[in-house]
Each structure stands twice: as structure tokens, then as C-alpha cells.
Amino acid sequence: MANGSRQAAWEFFGAELKRRREDAGLTQSSLGLQVFVSGAYIGQFEQAIRKPQLDVAQRIDEILQSDGIFERMCRKLIDDKRYADYFAHVVELERLATRICEFAPALVPGLMQTAAYARAVTVAMNPFAPDEYIEEKVAGRLERQSILKDATRPAYWVILHEHVLRIPVGGPAVMAEQLERLVAQARERTVLVQALPYAAGPYAVMNGMLALMEFEDAPPTAYTEAVYSGNLLDDPAVVKRSYSAYDLLRAAALSPQASLDLIESAAEGYRRCASTT
């Protein structure tokens, strides 16, 4: 589904939600109370600022007695085969974010991957998948990166564990290209990159993948990911703890310049290796 039609569909979802809510004589706050979100969140759904997750849509159907219409719309709108079901909502939020802070413990984040690196990761995770499936996933990942090219791009801060630099994804040439891309993006100031060295201690064990997103007119969220699953965290107390965890990672990481020196050194090593094979 193209981005424009997808957004139009979410706007229809919001307009239909507002109409049925008002027909039921409920305020945003009273509906939110019954579906376990705030009234402000209901307002964001109605304005298509934030997209409700499937379980929220199901509870809205139950309260408004809408015969499953919101669940069906939600399932249709998140049925984008380029992204896993648990990640589709995160893609929508990335497009709205004014600031994204990410910690990558093992792999280069999707927003910064080259096509060759993304393809190598996708093949490694789906060794029996056909080429069409692989290319569809890679295309989706590269499409996400358009948010960093817009004039209104979010401030993007990334902390990479040294694992990311040392795990040879796709071979030396692929790694050299990928790490050189990281350096170029940092020098262009489209992203601020820090490296968390092995010497920093057990931070990669203590903290898995973490992304923090801030918005103009909505509360911040945190996203964590494990094998074939992801958690979008909206609870203010949990988000606050996630920010505290990120602050510790940032304090333990190398300075931006020292980080670039480390990344450039690793890229040079891969480039030399590639030239001799």
C-alpha cells in the first residue's frame, strides 16, 4: 500500500472512530478509560497522528459494539508484507518522530543499513526464503530510510556496541561499505553516532535493542525487540526507565569523534581484507 493511500486509510479509521464514539455519547476521555488508554490517545487516533495497535482496536470494537470494523481495518492496514506484524506500527511512528535515540547491540540499525548489508541480514534470518521475499524485505528497510532525507527529518542518535563493528555480516566488502556509510552519515550530521566499546563492560548483556521516539504533540514511546517479537512501550514509568537506561549507555560510550575513529579503523581493516580475497 502506498504511503499516501495508507495515510488516507488511517484518516478514515480516525473519522469513523470519532463518528461512532459521538454516536455512542462518549467523550474521548470516557472511551479511553474503557479501553485502557488516555483520552488524549483517542484524540490522536481520531486525528491519525498515532495508529492504534490491534488489541486497542479490538477493545474499541467491544465498547462501541461496532461489529469488528476497527479490528478489520487495523488488520488490513498493518498487513504490509515488508514488515513483521509487530514492527509495522513502529514504522508509522518513525515517520512522525521528531527525535529517535537507538541502541544497537549486534547489528546496524535498519535506518542506516546499506542494501547489501540488509540483504545479508535478511538471508541469514530466512535461509530458505525465495529471492522475491528477500528483496521485498530489503526494499521495505530501504524505504524506511527516506525519513532521514527529508527536511523535517528527526534528530537521530545511535549507540552501536562494538559487536556491530566486529560481526562480519555479508563478508569484508559488505562490512567495509556499511561502516563507511556510517561514517559518511555522521560527517554529514544526519545522525550522531557513538560506539560502546568492549571495555565498557556488560552493557550489551544488560540492555538489548532499544529505540526511543519523541513526537511534537504526543508522549514519547520506547521500543524493544527480541527474536520474532517486539514491544512498543507507552507506559510513562517504563518509558522513563528506558530513558535512564539509554543515559547510562551514552555515558559509557566513546565520544562521537573517538567513535568515528574506531568505526573508520574497522572499515579500513575490512577493506584491506576485501582487497586480498
Image (cartoon, grey):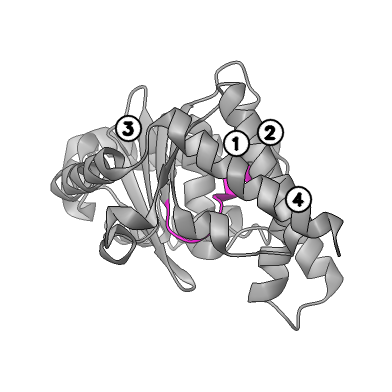
Real-space Cα distance between discs 3 and 2? 21 Å
Sequence-first disc among 3 and 1: 1
Q: What residue did someone put label 4 on?
A: 271
Q: What residue did someone put label 1 on?
A: 7
Q: What residue did someone put label 3 on?
A: 43
Q: What residue did someone put label 2 on?
A: 4
Residue type pointed to by label 1: Gln
Front-lying residue, 69 or 73: 73
Task: Determine whether, in the image, residue 267 is placed left or right of residue 159.
Answer: right
Real-space Cα distance between discs 4 and 2? 41 Å
Q: Secondary structure at mark 2?
A: helix
Q: Which residues are magenta?
A: 104-116
What is the quadrant of residue 80 in the picture?
A: bottom right
Residue type pointed to by label 4: Arg
Residue type pointed to by label 3: Gly
| Quarter that holds the C terminus | bottom right
Of discs 3 and 2, which sits in the foreground?
2
Residue 243 spot, x, y in % from top left: 23, 41
Real-space Cα distance between discs 3 and 1? 16 Å
What is the quadrant of residue 240 in the picture?
A: top left
Crowdedness near tag 1: few (<14), some (14–19) or many (≥20) residues, C-alpha within 10 Å: some
Front-lying residue, 118 or 154: 118
Residue type pointed to by label 2: Gly
